[in-house]
Amino acid sequence: DGGITQSPKYLFRKEGQNVTLSCEQNLNHDAMYWYRQDPGQGLRLIYYSQIVNDFQKGDIAEGYSVSREKKESFPLTVTSAQKNPTAFYLCASSIHGEPNSPLHFGNGTRLTVT
Amino acid sequence: GEDVEQSLFLSVREGDSSVINCTYTDSSSTYLYWYKQEPGAGLQLLTYIFSNMDMKQDQRLTVLLNKKDKHLSLRIADTQTGDSAIYFCAEDDYGGSQGNLIFGKGTKLSVKP
């Protein structure tokens, strides 16, 4: 079955360490996105990519970095510069330019930094 | 900037109807969406409505759009315990491209047996 896989489901890191969250999709979608979700908050867009080797900053890109070397993969690195990294991170994908094409979400990675 | 607002909690009894309300600010939105999030999971698209429509019905779900008041609602008929989840309203911010959605904070629906 096609879908989006995020791994790991839970991740623990010490403050000051960079950490990379994995997101893989086999839906052949062009566009991929990273969102951050905090308790009682909506989703906030971190980065998005509409095509391989290209990506744009979202609303809260500071302290994060991404790469898009392959269509299937869009890893997110949470750097030590991110002041409040503990959150639930959601990856999504869609067919670029298709308004009726739904966003497909992964099941998320819960990152805890102590 | 654009904003989407919704109440944070709603509690109903099993079998009753649930109505989740949402207001948005961007009058140029092309589509408005309702997503459902179950605990520990990602979001799942429930339904969407094109901005030139007033109503859309899909089985137990009815979406009403009042474009003049920028008000969107989701009605769930015959609410079941399996409907307990967080429901997010969202508007598109980029001519329909779903990646640039503005999400509300979500309404947590609790269904009591």
Image (spheres, coloured by chain):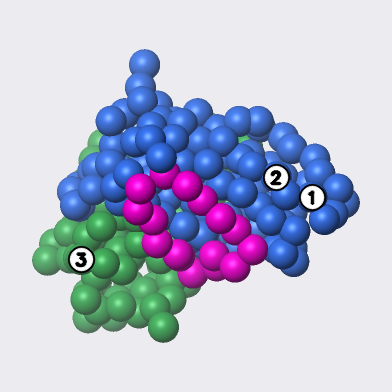
Chain colours: A blue, B green
Marks 2 and 3, Cα distance to the nearest angstrom? 34 Å
Label 3: element kind: loop
Label 1: element kind: loop
Marks 1 and 3, Cα distance to the nearest angstrom? 38 Å
Residue A109 x/y as whole percent: 63, 39
For the point 12% across and 66% down, the residue is B52
Would you call the spot at circle 1 few (<14 residues within 10 Å), some (14-19), or many (20 or more)?
Answer: few
Residue where numbered disc 3 is placed: B95
Name the side, left or right, on which A6 lies relative to B50.
right
Q: Give the range drawn in magenta.
A: A53-68
Q: What residue type is labelled 2?
A: Val
Residue where numbered disc 2 is placed: A19
The C terminus of chain B - image quarter: top right
Residue B66 shows in the view: yes
Question: Is residue B40 positioned above or below A44 on the image?
Answer: above
Residue B44 x/y as whole percent: 42, 40
Residue A84 x/y as whole percent: 74, 63
Residue where numbered disc 1 is placed: A17
Question: Is residue A6 positioned above or below B2 on the image?
Answer: above
Q: Do the residues labelled 2 and 1 touch (CB within 8 Å)?
A: yes
